[in-house]
Each structure stands twice: as C-alpha cells, then as structure tokens.
Amino acid sequence: MKQKTLLLKQSIKLLESLQSCWSDDVLVFSHSDKFLRLSLQLISRYTTWLSSGLAARNASDGSTSSPADSEWALSVPVEDFIYVMHDVNAVIGELSESGDFVGRVNQLLASCPIEVLTLVKQSILQAVEPLKELLPSIMDVMIGVIVKRSNEDLKHLKGITATYRMTNKLPVRHSPYVSGILHPLKVFLEGDRVHYLSEDDKTKLRRGSTDKITATYYDMVSEVVNVARKTESSLQRLRQGQQKRIGGSTDASDNIISDTDKICMQLFLDIQEYARNLRTLGIDAREIESYRSLWQCVAPKDKQDSIQF
C-alpha cells in the first residue's frame, strides 16, 4: 500500500516512532509485548491530542480554559483542518490491515504462533478505531466555520420586511444578499489546500455545509414570514375595528397586495436564485429537505407542487 505524504509534524512523529519501535536495531524480540504496548500508547496519545483539540474548537464558550495540548486547534485557521483530515486518513491507512505497519510487525513476529499474530493485528486495528471515530468531528469543524460565515449574509434577509413596508413596488429580482450566502463555501473549495481532501470528503463538505446553510435559511425565512403574517393580521383587525366604528366598507382593501405577499414574492425570487447557486456547486436543491420546506413557505399557491428554478 502506497503511503501518503504526511503534512503535520505530530503525524510524522507518530509514524517515525512506530517504525522505530519495530526496526531491526531497536526491537528486542523477547520483549515484543512491551514494544506492542508502547505502539498502542503512541497511537492513543495521538488520538487524545486530536480529540482534545477538536473538543476545544467545538466548545461553545470560547472563554473557558483549554488543556495545553489543545491550544493548537484554537489558534490555527479552519483551512488547516484540511491538513488534519488528510493526515488522519493517511495514518488510518498506514495502520490498517493492508497498511505497511501491520505487515512490518507481522513480518518481524513471523515465528510466533498464528494466534499471537492475530492478537497483535487485532490490537493495532482496535487502537485505530477511536481515531476513525474522530473523522466526522474534523469535518464538522470545517462545516461549522463555513456555515457561521454564511450566516452573516443570511442575516440581511431580515431587512426585506422593512423594505416592503415602505414601498408599494413589487419585487422583480433577487436580493443582493443571496449571492453571498454560498460564497464562504466556494472560497473554501477553491482554496489552494483543498486538493489534500479526497473527492469523497469534498462531497461530504459540500453536502454537509449546504444542508446546514439551507436549514438556517429556512428557519430565518419562516420567522420573517410568520412575524409578517401576525403583524398583517393585527393591522387588519385594527383597520376593521376602525371601519366598523365609522361605518366604512372593508371591500376596498381586499384587492390590495399585502406587505406579507410582497415579502413572500421577494423571498421566492431569492430562494430560486439560491437554488441556481447551489446547482453551480453540484447540489440539487430539491434533494435538500429544508429547501423543500423553504419552497412551501414562500412559493405561490399555483407553484407549491413543482419546484422549478
């Protein structure tokens, strides 16, 4: 199995130490059990270093003190986690059943009974399992920062309410904020480090980021529309009460396009443009559950059943 080039000094040191443990000029065959124990401890320490850093990075309160071995995760830019993902995958590959390390150990212990060789191999493979379990957390760090950056543009949609309470004009094109929603993801995917991610990881990053961004988009749109409808309903009851007191007719206001209608029309234009931007990233908006909810929230009645953009 071809070994990937490692990028982080911690990963390089781990494999150098493991290889040194089982080199011809270091290994004492009669104490092989101790060398195995040392190897497992090295793998465990690497895993602990990584898990501590991820835990510190994901901590909701950044003011809490973090262990010294986790400071690295707080100080590096999120793009550096591409290197982390690359190295962890490489280490896992090297320590897998088909990796060079297990093969080297088995070769050195070839004179041992098959039961011993099996136990040694299982011990190494089992030690790597906690490391594998950290892969989703590494991905979550990258996705989390991308989503947070996207949310800064999404916040601008709340200004739509004020806009359409001050004008009778109907919306004709999407809002400027829409083009910025997916910009952080595009920048990340076009960065000079992204080639260190596997195609599978790039797909997970795209899908995970757009799923969460779209879910936040839906939550914000739903809130804006619900508040607009409640406000509209309150104003309508107030007008009706006033008209009853003066004996006026309510028919004249029935044909006026409400602020809520205008807001929904604008948001409908926005989410269609958003879907087109998703498509440039290879994502079909119709496959995202929260996008379907988004469509149901603002699409006109005659377009509710067919998502077209």
Image (cartoon, rainbow, N blue to C red):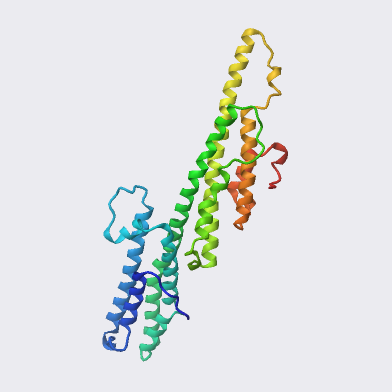
Tell me residue 90's x, y (percent): 44, 72
Q: How many marks?
A: 0
Looking at the image, residue 127 lies above or below residue 116: above
Provide residue 150's location: percent of width, then percent of height.
50, 48
| 67 w.r.t. 107: above or below | above
Is residue 208 visible from the viewing direction of this image?
no
Q: Nearer the viewer, residue 301 or 16?
A: 16
Residue at x 58%, y 26% (from the top left corner): 166
Frontmost residue, 44 versus 184? 184
The answer to whether residue 278 is left or right of residue 8 is: right
Residue at 48% across / 68% down in the picture?
Answer: 196
Which quarter of the figure has residue 302? top right
Instruction: Determine if residue 33 is in view.
Output: yes
Q: Picture coordinates of residue 123 (x, y %)?
A: 37, 76
User: On the picture, is 308 further left or further right than 157?
Assistant: right
Q: Residue placed farthest to the right in the image?
A: 302
